Amino acid sequence: MALLLAAVAGILLTAPADSARSTQLRATARKHRRADHRALQAEAKDSSKARR
């Protein structure tokens, strides 16, 4: 019984940290996708100016 309680307590302690970490990773990935998109747009804009 004590092992079961320890396991449940361990899960309850680590779940919020794991959730926060995955949220942080998603936010960072979103930020990098936006930066990549902006860089591609700027590159496309520059290359269209070079063609003129």
Image (cartoon, rainbow, N blue to C red):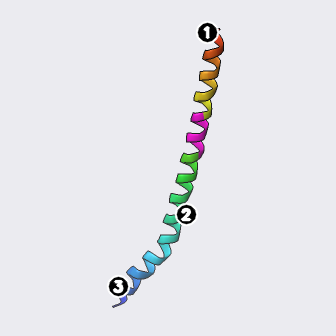
Write down the residue under mark 3. Answer: 3
**Is the residue marked by circle 1 packed among few (<14), some (14-19), or many (20+) residues within 10 Å?**
few
Give the residue at x 58% y 35%. Answer: 37
Q: Nearer the viewer, residue 6 or 37?
A: 37
Give the residue at x 56% y 47%. Answer: 30
x then y, percent, for residue 21: 53, 60
In the image, is 14 to the left or to the right of 45? Answer: left
Write down the residue under mark 2. Answer: 20
Q: Which residues are magenta?
A: 31-37
Write down the residue under mark 1. Answer: 51
Q: Secondary structure at mark 1?
A: helix
| Distance (Cα) linking label 3 and label 2 | 26 Å
The mark closer to the camera, 1 or 2, is 1
| Distance (Cα) linking label 1 and label 2 | 47 Å
Query: Can you say whether 26 is above or below 17 in the image?
Result: above
Which residue type does callout 3 highlight? Leu
